[in-house]
Amino acid sequence: MRVVSLVPSLTEAVARTLPGTLVGATDWCTHPAGLDVVRIGGTKNPDTARITALAPDLVIANEEENRAPDIAALRAAGLPVLVTDVRTVPEGIAELDRVLTACGARSRPRWLDDAEAVWSAPALPGPGGRVTAVVPVWRRPWMVLGRDTFAGDLLARLGVANLHAGHAERYPRIPLAELRAAGPDLVVLPDEPYRFTADDGPEAFPGLPCALVDGRCLTWYGPSLAEAPRRLAAALRAARR
């Protein structure tokens, strides 16, 4: 199999499970470290001509991360494109199974079994009691997690209730004053897609605990799922001390 991945988390999953299968990946595919494949541009602006020239047997994409016109262009060029659709942790695990099978895996990798077992545990680690949160994913303008998001479902399973989970939009723009006025117990600040840091983000929410979390653990469905509950719970607890 020759596979091109347009999704960082799927790149990591395929590279770890089926070494040598990937021939192309986006500029944002940072895991595993040292991945030596042709880079084909960003998730939103892939070089479709370069992808076609690689003659892949399969291109893997995601309906949220990748643009419909790019997917259509690849299909028009005669390339098979598998598009994942993920809104929950169980859907993420199921889609990983589907992708890896399509890429030639003859059995399920141990890391995927571990991830499913961790997220199926009756008592997941959490911040200690159920808490409410706002979860910005961008600033200038401020955007937060809204309805039907993978990250929102993941946090809910850890005992963190997203205050904007009922919003009509999946990633609504909310003025900062409204985010503060919502009165969350916690503000969750991932380091992607916007790179929130200790000096860029918490200062906007004076008096509120802010948890700086690994965006890969929060938003990627891949090998990181197995370690995500432990790492996220530690960051959430630390912010509330």
Image: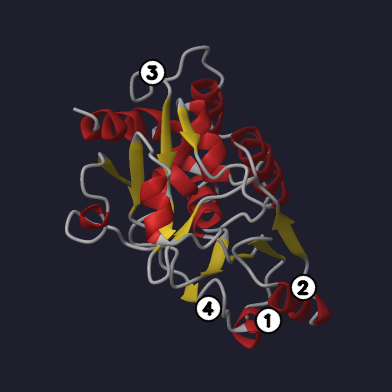
Q: Is mark 4 on a helix, strand or loop?
A: loop
Q: How far apart are marks 4 and 2 (CA)?
A: 15 Å
Of residues 209 and 193, the one nearer the viewer is: 209
- 149 in relation to 2, above or below: above
Q: Which residue is drawn at 36% across and 49% down?
A: 180
Q: Do the residues labelled 1 and 2 touch (CB within 8 Å)?
A: yes
Kind of residue at badge 2? Leu
Q: Nearer the viewer, mark 2 or mark 3?
A: 3
Q: How far apart are marks 1 and 2 (CA)?
A: 7 Å
Kind of residue at badge 4? Ile
Q: Distance between the residues labelled 1 and 3?
A: 51 Å
Q: Residue at x 49, y 59 (%)?
A: 8
Which residue position holds label 3? 129
Q: Do the residues labelled 4 and 1 touch (CB within 8 Å)?
A: no
Image color mode: secondary structure
Q: What element carries label 3?
A: loop
Q: Which residue is drawn at 38% across and 23% down?
A: 126
Q: Nearer the viewer, mark 1 or mark 3?
A: 3
Residue with the most extreme bottom position: 49
Q: Distance between the residues labelled 4 and 1?
A: 10 Å
Which residue position holds label 4? 40
Which residue position holds label 2? 79
Which residue position holds label 1? 52
